Amino acid sequence: MAANKYYDAYYKSTTLISGSSSGIISSSLGGSVTGVLNLNPKAKYHILGEDVEVSGYVATVAVATLNVLGKPFYDELKKNGVCFCSEIEEYLKVKFKNMERDNKIESILDKPHENI
């Protein structure tokens, strides 16, 4: 245990991962070296039946819950000021508009027609 204590005092390394870049910052008693690696990662999420590719990362718990609960959950997130990245927000806007349109068309087709 004492060896780890001395090691930690002499050399410390931290990895930072945030959105579209990650970096490693290393420091020791002799100075520090900083390396930043811009990867611009692309991540795919399965949202409401379709794969959506976005730059960066999204809270997968929110995506999974959105897949189960749908638009009412999304509306609650918006009321509380929670936002997804712009790619997902745009996708959801179009997806919910299309779903609403499809529901209206189905309701019109399901109405009994009166013979004139």
Image (cartoon, helix red, strand yellow):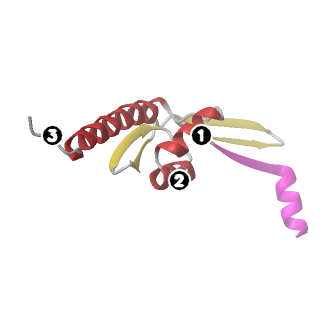
Please tell me whether residue 71 belongs to the stretch shown in magenta: no
- Identity, as a three-letter code, of the amino acid under mark 3: Glu
Residue 7 horizontal side relative to residue 86, left or right: right
Q: Does the magenta stretch include residue 7?
A: yes
Numbered badge on residue 65: 2
Label number found at residue 114: 3
In percent of width and height, residue 109 lies at: 20, 43
Image location of residue 29, percent across then percent down: 84, 42
Q: What element carries label 2?
A: helix
Instruction: Give the residue at x 23% y 44%.
Output: 111
Question: Residue at point 45% right, 40% down?
Answer: 41
Q: Judging from the image, what secondary structure is the residue with disc 3 in?
A: loop
Specify the segment rendered in magenta: 1-16
CA gap, disc 1 to disc 3?
A: 40 Å
Query: Mark 2 or 3 closer to N-term?
Result: 2
Q: Where is residue 114 in the image (x, y as percent from the top left)?
A: 15, 40
Answer with the quarter of the image where residue 73 lies: top right
Which residue is the extreme one toward the front? 116
Q: In what element is the residue under mark 1?
A: helix
Say which residue label 1 marks.
76
| Mark found first going from the N terminus, 1 or 3 | 1
Determine the CA span between mark 2 and mark 3.
42 Å
The quarter of the rendered structure image containing the C terminus is: top left
Q: Nearer the viewer, mark 1 or mark 3?
A: 3
